[in-house]
Image: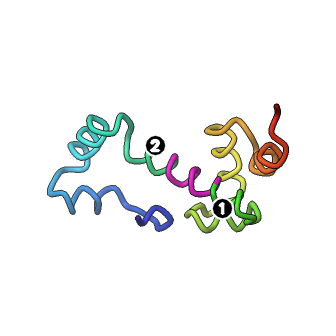
Amino acid sequence: ANYSEKLVLEELARNTALSKFHFIRQFRKYYGRTPHQYLKEVRIEAAKRLLKNGAKVSEACFQVGFESPTSFSMLFKEITGYNPSDFLKKEQYPRA
């Protein structure tokens, strides 16, 4: 629910009464990825929805919690295979 905010691993672990390292192990056990990997994926999925609904790339970047459009674009491409602007074109003109 708070994916767009700056999340601190130590605080998340403290809220679960676990050490940071045990929290990471338990999170990975149940979700198949680290908290950081999970957060990146959630943010990119949210950015995809924003872009589909007409948000500009920079707007989507900041709304989902990234501080740098460059790092956002690089991660977006790493996860989706497309630059954010190319993703929009792909969505507008999908291949048959």
Q: Which of the two residues, 92 or 41, is positioned nearer the viewer here?
A: 92
Residue 28 percent location from the top left of the image? 31, 37
Q: Quadrant of residue 63?
A: bottom right
Residue 54 percent location from the top left of the image? 75, 64
Which quadrant is home to the C terminus? top right
Residue 21 percent location from the top left of the image? 25, 43
Image: 46 above or below 77: below
Asked whether 70 falls inside the magenta stretch, the response is: no
What residue range appears in magenta? Answer: 41-48
Q: How crowded is mark 1: few (under 14 residues within 10 Å), some or many (20 or more)?
A: some
Residue 76 appears left or right of 64:
right
Q: Residue 62 carries which label?
A: none
* Image color mode: rainbow
Q: Which of marks 1 and 2 is in front?
A: 1
Q: Residue at x 24, y 47 (%)?
A: 23
* Secondary structure mostly seen in the magenta stretch: helix
Kind of residue at disc 1: Leu
Q: Residue 37 carries which label?
A: 2
The single residue placed furthest to the top in the displayed view is 96
Q: Which residue is drawn at 71% across and 57% down?
A: 52
Image: 30 above or below 55: above
Which quadrant is home to the N terminus? bottom left
Residue 40 appears left or right of 96:
left
- Provide the secondary structure element on which disc 1 rests: helix
Q: Residues within 10 Å of mark 2 (few under 14, many from 20)?
A: few
Alpha-carbon distance for marks 1 and 2? Answer: 20 Å
Q: Quadrant of residue 47?
A: bottom right
Q: Mark 1 points at which residue?
A: 50
Upstream in sequence: badge 1 or badge 2: 2
